[in-house]
Amino acid sequence: MTQRYPFTRRAALLGGGALLGARPSRADTSCCGPITPAGQALAAFLDGTRVEQLWPAGWHVDWRSGQPNRPRPGGHEAATHCSAFVAAVALRLGIYVLRPPEHPQELLANAQLAWLDEAGPSQGWEPVGDMRQAQALANQGSLVLAAYRAPDPHRPGHIAVLRPSLKSVERLEEVGPEIIMAGVTNYRATTVAQGFRHHPGAWAPGGAGDIRYHAHAVDPQRLLARLD
């Protein structure tokens, strides 16, 4: 059954990120502004990825779909798929981020962050200065990534997608932006503090850790097409 969302194709997204005839969600106490209709559409799209059922840890998966095909030797933590999930989300939105076959799935998160720093701007990616701006951009419907590169190049880093949130300034400082991710545990919605907890030094209250943020504009028509 097709999932229904609180908007129609006739309410086409404008270049400024608003839906005709729609009003942004109110956010009187939000850290990072209201969730615009484009942000609402992004949240619906992210929910539709079914990340909690797909891209399971400990399995080989098709990176595009997240469908597991066979167990991977080494147990639950031997294979996690944060970077494959990010690549699949970007692909569905018509956005390029480093992905197979240009790089294997192993240690891909580290390579994706290096690529975002070096080649990302030529592909429409922009570095985001702080987590408050990053959450605000997600609320406005941009694709925003939170990424951490492991100090040891032979150890995996981590990468996740920000999702819109109306959390307060205090909550943002305490636990960071809201994310959707694959990993040891897959989350449809969690915080940076929770999602990056297996990587010492990645997160510290107030955003003082080594997590970096990058953002890319989303084509509104493509996003609506993914929701039909």
Image: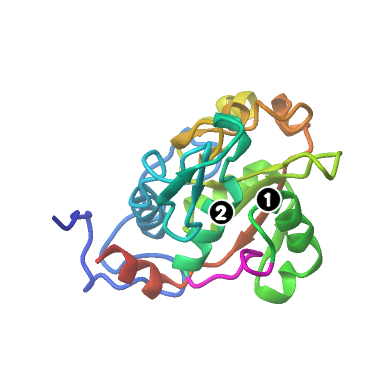
Q: Quadrant of the C terminus?
A: bottom left
| 143, 55: nearer the viewer | 55
Instruction: Specify the amino acid type for callout 1.
Output: Glu
Q: Residue furthest left?
A: 1
Residue 89 higher or lower than 199, as above or below: below
Determine which quarter of the picture holds residue 174. top right
Q: Residue at the spot x=86%, y=39% of the render?
A: 152
Image side of residue 101 versus residue 120, left or right:
left
Q: Residue at the spot x=54%, y=46% of the render?
A: 162
Span shown in magenta: 94-102
Q: Residue at the spot x=45%, y=75% of the render?
A: 15
Residue 99 lies within the magenta run: yes
Secondary structure mostly seen in the magenta stretch: loop
| 184, 217: nearer the viewer | 184
Task: Let me know if residue 35 appears in the view.
Answer: no
- Which mark is on residue 106? 1
Residue 31 higher or lower than 113, as above or below: above
Residue ID for mark 2: 84
Please rate how many residues cluster around mark 1, counting C-alpha atoms within 10 Å: few if below 14, some from 14 to 19, many from 20. some
Image side of residue 9 versus residue 155, left or right:
left
- Which mark is on residue 198? none
Instruction: Specify the amino acid type for callout 2.
Output: Ala
Provide the secondary structure element on which disc 2 rests: helix
